[in-house]
Amino acid sequence: MSAGQDGERIGVYVCHCGSNIAGKVDVAAVRDWAAERLGSHGVVLARDNKFMCSSTGQELIEQDIRELGLTRVVVAACSPHMHEKTFRAACARAGLNPYLCELVSIREQVSWVHSDQAAATAKAKAVVAGGVYRVAEHAPLEPIRVAINPTTLVVGGGIAGITTALELADAGFPVHLVEREPSIGGHMAQFDKTFPTLDCAACILTPKMNEVGTHPNITLHTWSEVTNVSGYVGSFQVTIRHRARYVNADLCTGCGICQEKCVERVVDEAYEAGLGYRKGIYMPFPQAIPKVPVLDREHCVYFEKGTCKACEKFCPTGAIDFTQEDDEVTVEVGNIVVATGFRLFDPRRVEPYGYGRLPNVFTSLEFERMSNAAGPTGGRIVLRDGVTEPRAVGIVHCVGSRDRNYNEYCSAICCMQSLKFAHLVREHTDADVYEFYIDIRAPGKAFDEFYQRVLEEGTVFVRGRVAEVTDALRFPDEAEHDGRLIVQVEDTLAGVQRRVPVDMVVLSAALEPPKDAYDVARRFGLSCSSEGWVIERHPKLDPVATMTEGIFAAGCALGPRDIPSSVANGAAASARILGRIYQGEMLLEPVRATVDEARCSGCKVCNDLCPYNAITFRADAGVSAVSPALCQGCGTCIAACPAGAMTGTGFSDDQVMAQIEGLLSASLAAPPAPVEVPTPEAVPA
Amino acid sequence: MSDQTRAAAADGSRFEPVILGFTCNWCSYRAADLAGTARIGYPPNIRLVRLMCSGRLDPTFVLAAFARGADGVVVSGCWPGECHYQVQNLRMLGRFLLLRRTIARLGIEPARLQLVWASAAEGQRFAREIARITEEVRALGPLGWSAATDGAAGDLAGVLEAAAGAEAADGAAPALPAEPVDGADPASPAEPVEVAR
């Protein structure tokens, strides 16, 4: 296993990174040590440079490869997550296979975390040795090339999904947009106004929905769900299940007569958030896209009792079809965007706030529907009896978020949404408004200005987490508030307990991942956090890509966010996909598992370990096989293979073992005894 | 406490253990990166090997590390439920627990093999855990396994080689030494492993 036997010529480059590394690591000592002590492992030269990543540093490597015939390169500098690509590219320019270069970190993992110069230098030597031993085991690799199908699947028809679909379709590429509900629009379609500009949500959303509905490049699948995903980046096969609408979409004109004639009235838990009713056959709202109703067979007199068919009788085009059944289609796509949004935290879980028990406690979504001119109350803000205007309204922030009992995260939109509610209450009624908040978080564009505006309008802000909302009067002077609600809160600014009488309480409930977030994640092969939000490839630098190649995420599927962020996500995801479509093919990192068929006993241990279904058993040959495009390179199967038949490029047993040997060799070579005393001025030039 | 530690303590210098850390590419190595970027210091005794996933941890990596002179081994991955390969860190957990029992049988204190969950955002936690583990391994003293196994017939390095080279087809389990390796402390009972956050 020892290096150098095959006549490898390894170059070692130690970076100063200005004083970032050189301030703690004796770079010259590491360089000299590598040249002297690692010569037997193939090191033919060791150099140092102020900034290896600079053009001079890179040219140094290129020159040495060309002139001195280096066959392997080890750069000791920053984390591979920082500059691995940089140095691989430098090698490639000089004609050396980029995978014969190894970047080892002596900055993040050494100079930035260790204060003792001698110890840091000793560790840097070990790290360099690890790299040298490892790189000797590297093999030239070629990136995997896959063709990109220009069609894209967008899952979720909220504002994030709509934006993604339109961007891609406008660029001239086909899109399949799948939405679980009868209409696209998502939560934004439920809102009246949007913060902080108070734009009418419908006015800005419905034109986009129409565009989606009529776009020649968009195939809309509403009342549908993705049931299966197979394949890999560039060529996914996606099965979409269309639930039976019992309405022939080709014949339906969307006139709405069926809805009018239907005798079944159902509380609309979805679009109206439980505040209004719909019919058994219905379009969730007048601007729905597509303009084709859905017959809810759970609430249909015909399906319940075998007779009625009022809708069918009155339909002028004969579009009602009780014989329809669910059907499935399979589409081929190159990339997928998951924009599955959020669901509202159920505030019944916070029992002291009384939601579900005290009629005049509302959720934020109920309030959105109430304040909407097209909503169940026609935009009037009234108590649950439907007539009485409140004299005072309390708005409670952070219900189910920033709370260890439920969700620790901040739901991002609640502060601004609550400020909007305060403004709307004062616009529609004469009521006093109380905001019960922990902190006001108003970091977006024009957000704080809106906060100031609401303050000036006379809304009362009480800083403190609400303990209880109750209709029980506790003190004699509360008698006049009989029948109202009391909000018990510790005013943390004044340092007093307050009992604030109000008529209506609005709970700004947390945003949570959809109930089936984990199933969705499994179906698409995504990673999600313990809460259920999709994990992005990098939280800062790659915020819409996921760990699975070819699958992106946008909007609240990634975590709570507002409309502008969701739109930005959607546009970003489509830009990433367009780049790939224009390239026609993409290169994948060749970190993959492979099976040595001669050693494979066909035990199938690996088959069930792969979360990407990349390993299949070939019954004809009696061995397992890995699909390189499906494999994500985690290496779990390699570690599990009892026969050692599974190997992995980039992280083979030999490479890891060599690195272990290298990392430990330095300490064995030199006795651990007295370490050199660092001299304070010993920073190399 | 071994003789070497005692000797080290006598002349006033501390025993500096060598600890090998296996990290995954996505969470724990990035936690180490973050500890660096945020300049959160920890003892220099640890040396990291980056794997793509903690699920890649071949048990022989750990045994090889001990055999080649490591006094302690840290395995670090994403938190359960947050693995970038979905559940592969849990596959590692199964192997880890088995390995801890195995090394106890081989005469290595289980505390020399430790598990750290760390998300990419937990540089602080990573540094703190490495510091804690370093002190624990320091207290245990040198393992001295590489010295004990060098050159001896039927030694552990030999066992490892045999295990690595064994064909699965023949199904024969590699022979293990009947007695604990000389110089190693008797196996202490496996400690419970903390897995919940």
Image (tube, coloured by chain):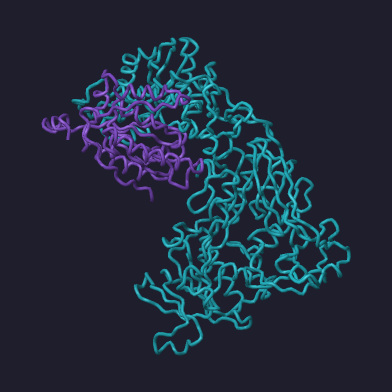
Chain colours: A cyan, B purple
Q: Is residue B153 left or right of residue A97?
A: left
Q: Which residue sits at x=44%, y=58%?
A: A408
- Answer left or right for A304 relative to A574: right
Quadrant containing the N terminus of chain B is top left
- Position in image of residue A116 (x %, y %): 25, 32
* Picture residue at 71% right of the left edge, 59% below the top: A183
- Residue A538, above or below A274: above
Q: Quadrant of residue B146?
A: top left
Nearest the eye: A149 or A432: A149
Q: Quadrant of residue A119?
A: top left
* Residue A448 horizontal side relative to residue A389, left or right: left
Using residue A519 as the reference point, say whether residue A151 is left or right of it: right
Task: Please tell me which residue lies in front, A407 or A35.
Answer: A407
Q: Is residue A466 above or below residue B87?
A: below
- Residue lying at 61% horizontally and 26% vertically, measured from the top left: A621
Residue B145: image x %, image y %?
26, 27
Q: Is residue B29 visible?
A: yes
Location of residue A362 in the rendering, given as x and y in whole percent from the top left corner? 55, 73
